[in-house]
């Protein structure tokens, strides 16, 4: 795939940084020789490792962005530990690297929730957030392929297997991925509530949603086998004080045969889609709500 407006790249730097409680976290920094565009933090989807985002991160770096990917801690964590401790540490690390300037977050699926559920101090360091396949996760709103297996996962496999194994063995079941026990219990609770997290645990998450002020652009795909347009609209509605914009795309509009829930970051044939996402990252603030729809 060709690179548009490319610049020289350094080899990715593999690094370790620490959450506030001292937990070491592993990240990868993709750095151009001369950073001339906003620094970008990529927050991954539930159960998806940072290596999945490496091609997109390298492509953004070729456009002049410093880009950080990272993996969340694997044990002894719930979803809010991930959002407020691990994601918060990643934002802080990239902000420090970026000379103290706020950064842009690209959140894939659950990755956007890290931005809306983190603490206010971390949110103040985010200039804007771009959601890719993100949405509220009430299972009855999911697209049919995921909705059909949801009762098995949320009402049977999760509750039975998580205490048995001490974690959710989703990888071998081809359900989401391996997840810490507390993450699976909380995610199950949220997905079984019609109002997702802010309905299931309002005392824990609503203050963060109220505090969010950064602009949000959410890309939603017609062939996503998990997140529907309803899911995405519900999530954007939860950002009560943040300007939001929904961009709904069919794969054919960006020259792809399919996108689905995971395909937006695969390099094969995806440059036109990546250019649309980059347009939202790079737009002037007053153009942000319009640029993604061009």
Image (tube, grey):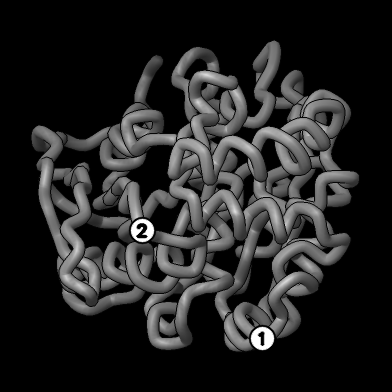
Instruction: Give whichever of 276, 142 is nearer the camera.
Output: 142
x, y percent for residue 137: 74, 52
Image: 92 above or below 45: below
x, y percent for residue 107: 51, 52
Is residue 273 visible in this depiction of the protein?
no
> Of discs 1 and 2, which sits in the foreground?
2
Give the number of the disc on residue 203.
Answer: 1
Instruction: Give whichever of 23, 113 is nearer the camera.
Output: 23
Give the number of the disc on residue 76.
Answer: 2
Image: 290 above or below 197: above
x, y percent for residue 168: 52, 38
Q: Mark 1 packing: few (<14 Cα in 10 Å), some, or many (20+)?
A: few
Q: Residue at x 17, y 74 (%)?
A: 99
Image: 12 above or below 72: above
Q: CA distance from mark 1 to mark 2?
A: 21 Å
Q: Residue at x 50, y 31 (%)?
A: 169
Is residue 257 visible in this depiction of the protein?
yes
Q: Residue at x 40, y 60 (%)?
A: 77
Q: Is residue 131 left or right of residue 24?
A: right
Q: Residue at x 46, y 35 (%)?
A: 178
Callout 1: helix, strand or loop? helix
Q: Is residue 155 left or right of residue 170?
A: right
x, y percent for residue 214: 56, 76
Instruction: Give whichever of 219, 198 is nearer the camera.
Output: 198
Q: How many marks?
A: 2
In the rendered image, which quarter contains the C terminus?
Answer: top right
In the rendered image, which quarter contains the N terminus?
Answer: top left
Callout 2: helix, strand or loop? loop
For residue 148, what is the image quadrant?
top right
Earlier in the chain: of badge 1 and badge 2, it is 2
């Amino acid at each position: 795939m060709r690179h548009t407006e490319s610049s020289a790249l350094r080899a990715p730097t593999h690094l370790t940084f620490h959450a506030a409680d001292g937990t070491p976290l592993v990240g990868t920094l993709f750095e151009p020789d001369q950073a001339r565009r906003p620094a970008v933090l990529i927050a991954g989807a539930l159960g998806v490792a940072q290596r999945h985002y490496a091609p997109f991160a390298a492509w953004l770096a070729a456009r002049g962005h410093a880009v950080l990917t990272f993996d969340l801690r694997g044990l002894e964590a719930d979803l809010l530990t991930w959002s407020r401790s691990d994601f918060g540490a990643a934002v802080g690390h990239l902000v420090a690297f970026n000379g103290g300037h706020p950064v842009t977050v690209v959140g894939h699926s659950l990755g956007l929730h890290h931005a809306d559920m983190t603490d206010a101090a971390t949110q103040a360091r985010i200039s804007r957030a771009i959601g890719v396949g993100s949405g509220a996760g009430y299972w009855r709103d999911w697209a049919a392929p995921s909705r059909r297996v949801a009762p098995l996962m949320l009402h049977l496999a999760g509750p039975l297997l998580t205490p048995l194994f001490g974690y959710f063995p989703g990888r071998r079941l081809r359900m989401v991925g391996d997840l810490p026990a507390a993450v699976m219990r909380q995610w199950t609770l949220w997905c079984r509530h019609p109002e997702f997290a802010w309905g299931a645990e309002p005392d824990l998450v609503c203050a963060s949603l109220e505090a969010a002020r950064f602009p949000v652009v959410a890309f939603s795909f017609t062939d996503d086998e998990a997140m529907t347009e309803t899911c995405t609209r519900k999530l954007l509605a939860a950002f009560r004080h943040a300007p939001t914009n929904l961009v709904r795309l069919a794969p054919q509009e960006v020259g792809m045969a399919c996108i689905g829930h995971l395909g937006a970051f695969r390099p094969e044939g995806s440059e036109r889609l990546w250019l649309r996402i980059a347009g939202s990252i790079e737009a002037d603030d007053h153009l942000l709500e319009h640029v993604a729809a061009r």
